[in-house]
Amino acid sequence: MRRFEHGGNVYAHPGALDFSASLNPLGMPPLARRALVEGVDVFEHYPDPACQELTDAIARFEGVGKGEVLACAGATDAFARICSAVRPRRALTCAPCYSGYEQACVQAGVDLTWHELCCEDGYLLTERFAERIEEGVNLVFVANPNNPTGLRAKEEVIRSCLERAREVGALVVLDECFVDLAGGHGSNALLGEFPNLVIVKALTKTYALAGLRVGYALCSDGGLLSALRDAGQPWAVSVPAQLAGVASLQDVGYLAKSQELVAGERARLGEALQALGLHVLPSDANFLLFEGPEGLHGQLLRCKILIRSCDNFRGLDSRWYRIAVRRPEENDLLVRALERLLRGGTEDKTGGGDA
């Protein structure tokens, strides 16, 4: 399981300040909290299998038709459904990238090929990836922004991938789980032009609903979306997840506030890490990837601060780490802990525990 290990395991490290999971630093929206409390009496019922209210809310938020939306139990559920429904023989993705693509392929018996991204390019996706989409490739995974590197791909590169995939008869899965916190716009405008495109998103990241497991897939091919629906378990999206998802998507001002916080703190945190002599990659997302001394995550854990070691990401090693962008006071705690560790000071073993 080591290669499929993720961040956010706060249960193994109680009391630690968690920088290992890249969630909205503002946490769950107040509207979602209220919806969960007020809706508790409904929890005894089975969920709506069609997720009608949630589907309507997603369609309005994304500016697409209800027939282009499939609610899922998080992005991981969507990836598993895609592999199960499409049954591709061969898939392609880049490295480093989210291990959930590989896990879905392994479970479905799909042969997965990697295109190694170049560190000198900041691990940016380029046209070279589109050139790897050749005859025999049935499924392509692309993340925008990429995880754990944080950079968004240029629009022309995404289009090149879609055009090349259409030529060889491949489906493109575009993972845009972090795009809303990155600001700007996603790739929904491409859905009508490319029926071979499935966009996957998760409220897990955008609204800090990780414990509720709620995400969705967008696709203009109704037949494919129907197949993805049939590939999942009945009642996959729980009642609490549906309630919190609907409420979160209605809180537009909350998202704008979150985007502003992420942009400002990402820049400030990146500058602070660079000032400590760490190699920090540019990022468009709500997390930063940096290179530092081996064992740094273990040292920080003794300071009650949890960061993501990237040694199980293909293409990275034990010198690479990913940290979430959190609230200013929490980011300051991390920077102070790093200052003590990197400059030979005394470790504060309670520094992050009170945050």
Image (tube, rainbow, N blue to C red):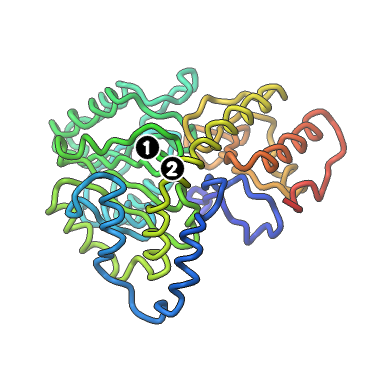
Q: Amino acid at mark 1?
A: Ala
Label 2 crowd (10 A; few <14 / some 14-19 / many >=20): many
* Dot label at residue 184: none
Sequence-earlier tag: 1 or 2: 2
Question: Residue 192, located in which quarter of the rendered image?
Answer: top left
Q: Secondary structure at mark 2?
A: loop
Q: Is residue 107 left or right of residue 308?
A: left
Identify the residue at horizontal 39%, vertical 78% (top origin).
42
Total numbered badges shown on the rendered structure? 2
The residue most toward the top is 120
Label 1 crowd (10 A; few <14 / some 14-19 / many >=20): many
Q: Is residue 12 left or right of residue 346?
A: left
Question: Residue 291, located in which quarter of the rendered image?
Answer: top right
- Residue 94 screen position, x and y as percent: 37, 33
Q: Amino acid at mark 2?
A: Tyr
Identify the residue at horizontal 63%, vertical 43% (top origin).
307
- Residue 88 screen position, x and y as percent: 22, 47
* Residues tagged 1 and 2 counted as in contact (Cβ below 8 A): yes
The residue most toward the front is 253
- Considering only vertical position in the picture, is 268 above or below 346? above
In the rendered image, which residue does mark 2 sit on?
A: 98
In the rendered image, which residue does mark 1 sit on?
A: 143
- Residue 136 screen position, x and y as percent: 18, 37
- Residue 171 screen position, x and y as percent: 20, 41
Q: CA distance from mark 1 to mark 2?
A: 8 Å
Identify the residue at horizontal 50%, vertical 71% (top origin).
37
Q: Is residue 110 left or right of residue 15?
A: left
